[in-house]
Amino acid sequence: MFFNAEECTDKLQSFAPLPAGDYKVCLTECKFEQSDEGYDIVKCSYQVLEGEQKDRTFNDSCWLTSSMATAQTNGRAKLKLLCDLAGIKALRGPSDLANFVGMVLLVTLDAYNKKDGSGIRNSVSNIQHGEAKPVAKKIHVQTGKKIEGL
């Protein structure tokens, strides 16, 4: 085993969920996985770029297939928003997900209590371009409706 302490930070990061709200983030990782049940998932990792939660990270999953219709609908909607923002019409395979890495985004993060009582979790409910001028309409992931005022 090799460990170089000079390459590490002494700043510990909380694993607690972030407060609900809007965050300017960088998408740092995007990968394809299958759940234990065989469902297709795109897992995304984000790092907060500004504000009180700066440098915190969080993960979000886009369920492409699922036995839960809402999870699948929301997952596909989130992935479509990412595709729209990246100017991609279709993903041809897991390697195409690399096109999303490094994107600066403004995400709306919800906090909710898990039904099984295991605590509070975060979920991305909206994604838009994080630069000065959004390049896509702000669409609510769960309803699919344009958010007024944009």
Image (tube, rainbow, N blue to C red):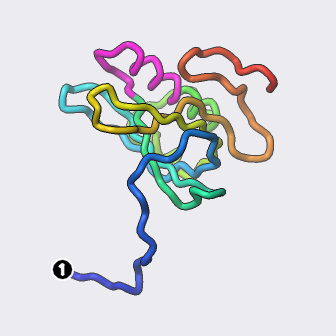
Residue type highlighted by circle 1: Met
- At x 75% / y 37%, what residue is drawn? 134
Which percent across, then down, holds residue 19? 53, 44
Q: Nearer the viewer, residue 64 or 49?
A: 49
Q: In the shown orientation, is residue 92 left or right of residue 86?
A: left
In this figure, which residue is indicated by the disc labeled 1?
1
| Secondary element at image label 1 | loop
Residue 71 within the magenta-colored segment of the rendering: yes
- At x 54% / y 61%, what residue is drawn? 55
- Determine the image quadrant of residue 41: top left
User: Image quadrant for the C terminus?
Assistant: top right
Residue 19 lies, with reference to residue 8, above or below; the image says above
| Dot 1 crowding, Cα within 10 Å, few <14, some 14–19, many 20+ | few
- Determine the image quadrant of residue 14: bottom left
Residue 6 within the magenta-colored segment of the rendering: no
Residue 5 lies, with reference to residue 103, above or below; the image says below
- Determine the image quadrant of residue 44: top left
- In the image, the segment drawn in magenta is 63-79
Q: Nearer the viewer, residue 127 or 40?
A: 127
- At x 44% / y 46%, what residue is drawn? 17
- At x 32% / y 25%, what residue is drawn? 115
